[in-house]
Image: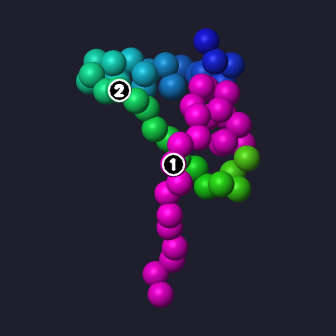
Amino acid sequence: MPVGRTAVVERVEELAREADRDSLTASCEWRNDGARRFYRGAGFEPKPVTYARPPE
């Protein structure tokens, strides 16, 4: 079991299995080191980039 796995992550995994989903996704701001550590510790891996910018 990944180190950062919590009851919340376990419950979301359970719901995903029940709904026959093939993956879980989560997002956070790149500068949010705590969230990035949490997700990595919970077994999440970085995936493709999402581009964003403020409206002009």
Residue 18 in the image: x percent, y percent? 28, 18
Percent across and percent down for residue 11 are 44, 21
Point out the stretch of residues depicted in magenta: 34-56
The three-letter amino acid code for the residue at tag 1 is Pro
Q: Relative to residue 33, is residue 23 drawn left or right?
A: left
Label 1 residue SS: loop
**Residue kind at label 2, given as amino acid type:** Asp
Q: Position of residue 32 (x, y in %)?
A: 69, 51
**Sequence order check: which comes first, mark 1 or mark 2?**
2
CA neighbours of label 2 inside 10 A, class few (<14), some (14 to 19), many (20+):
few
Q: Residue at x 58, y 50 (%)?
A: 28
Quadrant (top left, top right, bottom left, bottom right) of the N terminus: top right
Residue located farthest toward the front when viewing the structure as drawn = 48
Is 13 in front, or is 47?
A: 47
Residue at label 2? 22
Q: Which residue is mark 1?
A: 48
**Displayed quadrant of residue 45:** top right
Question: Residue 26: x, y in percent?
Answer: 50, 41
